[in-house]
Image (cartoon, rainbow, N blue to C red):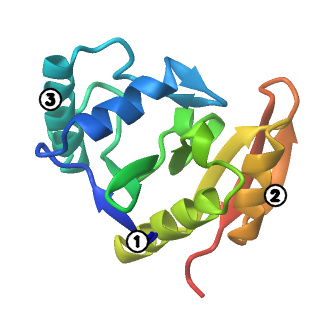
Amino acid sequence: MSNILQLKEASIHDGKAIFDLHNSIGKEDSGFTNPSFGLSYEEFKDYLQTLVSHAKGIDLPDGYVPQTTFWLSKDNHPIGISRLRHCLTDSLKIEGGHIGYYIHPQNRSRGFGNLLLELTLAKAREMSIGPVLLTCRIGNIASRKIIENNHGILENENSEKDTCYYWIDLSS
């Protein structure tokens, strides 16, 4: 078996495998929200167009910022999703940060979360985004380890919001 891993930007040509990955998430998983939850395959195709438009800053709802979505694939089978927000709003500084990521449960604890964040941080660097804020739930030890493995520095924990705030400097 080959084990070819790649990060690809969302495209209107993405198909059923991406749809199946999104369907496996549910509405929310460990702080990762899924706006495509409950969509039919035909509706999901429209959602893909929305992702492509939002990456370009087109047709953004009020309060939204440009955001690029990526799929992590192993042997052309999607196993993870990341979202890179190009800038922060006051709301994203409280919850969400620059990057959100998700690895399918069948592929967790195998290093893919570290790789997904590492590759997404490289995209942030290419886009001159930085320093990068990542947030996660205080009790989400797996996500905290992934962020720390990628040089995340804990700024603080807000127990009222159940949120940790990490910064990653991309200048080095």
Residue 131 lies, in percent from the top left, at: 57, 67
Residue 154 circle label: 2
Residue tagged 1: 4
Number of numbered callouts drawn: 3
**Residue plotted at (23% across, 14% down):** 40
**Residue plotted at (39% across, 73% down):** 128
Crowd class of label 3 (few under 14; some 14 to 19; many from 20; radius 10 Å): some
Residue 62 lies, in percent from the top left, at: 30, 25
Q: Residue lying furthest front in this view? A: 1
Instruction: Assign the N terminus to one quadrant of the image.
Output: bottom left
Residue tagged 3: 45
- Label 2 or label 3, whichever lies nearer to me, is 3
Choose the circle earlier in sequence order: 3 or 1: 1
**Identity, as a three-letter code, of the amino acid under mark 1:** Ile
Residue 84 lies, in percent from the top left, at: 42, 52
Relative to 43, 135 lies left or right: right
Choose the circle earlier in sequence order: 2 or 1: 1
Name the image quarter holding residue 48: top left
Crowd class of label 2 (few under 14; some 14 to 19; many from 20; radius 10 Å): some
Name the image quarter holding residue 162: top right
Instruction: Assign the C terminus to one quadrant of the image.
Output: bottom right
Q: CA distance from mark 3 to mark 1?
A: 26 Å
Crowd class of label 1 (few under 14; some 14 to 19; many from 20; radius 10 Å): few
**Residue plotted at (30% across, 46% down):** 66
